[in-house]
Amino acid sequence: MNGRVQPLTRDEIAPAARADLRAAFPRATRFLADGPHTPPLPPVLGLLARHTAISGPWLAFSGALLDHGVLDARTRELLILATAHRTGADYLWQEHVPLAAGAGLRADEVRAVRGASPHAWPPGDAALLALVDELVSDQRVDDGTWDALAERLDEQQLIEALFVVGTYCCLAMVLNTADVPVQEAP
């Protein structure tokens, strides 16, 4: 152990914390059930179970971005992958690559987000990637990037794009600092 806060196992999560997580983030229910067919508990949930007074509302907000946002899934997942890459959040990267594929990002695009292959991004996607770079580096989007995005996104989508990047930067900081391990494929 490295002395950092470690994720709890499913058995270590108190019933009240399980209830908090289920209430805040219904997607967590399948991981918190007891039974032979329960999937492995994602380490992120085990970590967040340590402080549900904070993580519960945060999960509810994060769930709203995933389930009730106005950005299309491809745009959202492109933003998340770019944020995971820029913040060095390997856990987030691994978790979102399959989601990105399901949202329509091609394998060559996923490789290109990581800089593993050249790619000619269409202007709208290039502006989304610039948004991530600028927010991570400067915590601000420059006027040229904003104007390019405003040609593609409406006001709600623009605001949501900022929240997606900010939310996943926050999660990356927590996961990276806690040294949450990348999950092994089942």
Image: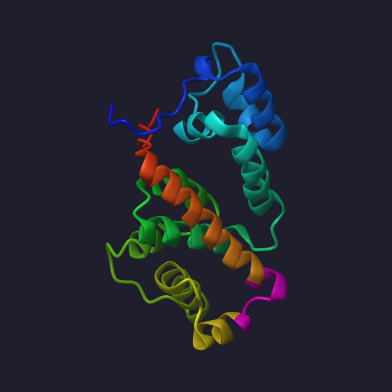
Residue 175 percent coordinates (x, y): 42, 43
Residue 19 percent coordinates (x, y): 69, 24
Which residue occupies 43% across, 50% down? 172
Residue 140 percent coordinates (x, y): 50, 75
Magenta-colored stretch includes residue 160: no
Front residue of this view, candidates 51 and 29? 51
Q: Is residue 4 above or below residue 144?
A: above
Which residue occupies 55% across, 16% down? 37
How many numbered marks have been drawn onto this rendered protein structure? 0
Compared across the picture, whether 180 is left or right of 80 comes to: left
Front residue of this view, candidates 52 and 89? 52
Residue 97 visible somewhere in the drawing = no
Colouring used for the render: rainbow
Which quarter of the rendered picture does the C terminus lie within? top left
Which quarter of the rendered picture does the N terminus lie within? top left
Magenta-colored stretch includes residue 151: yes
Which residue occupies 59% across, 39% down? 55
Which residue occupies 59% across, 22% down? 32
Q: Is residue 21 above or below residue 174?
A: above
Name the quadrant containing residue 17: top right
Compared across the picture, whether 12 is left or right of 68 comes to: left
Over which residues does the magenta segment extend?
A: 150-158
Residue 160 visible somewhere in the drawing = yes
Name the quadrant containing residue 82: bottom left
Q: Is residue 133 above or below residue 34?
A: below
Q: Is residue 111 above or below residue 171?
A: below
Name the quadrant containing residue 137: bottom left
Residue 76 percent coordinates (x, y): 56, 60
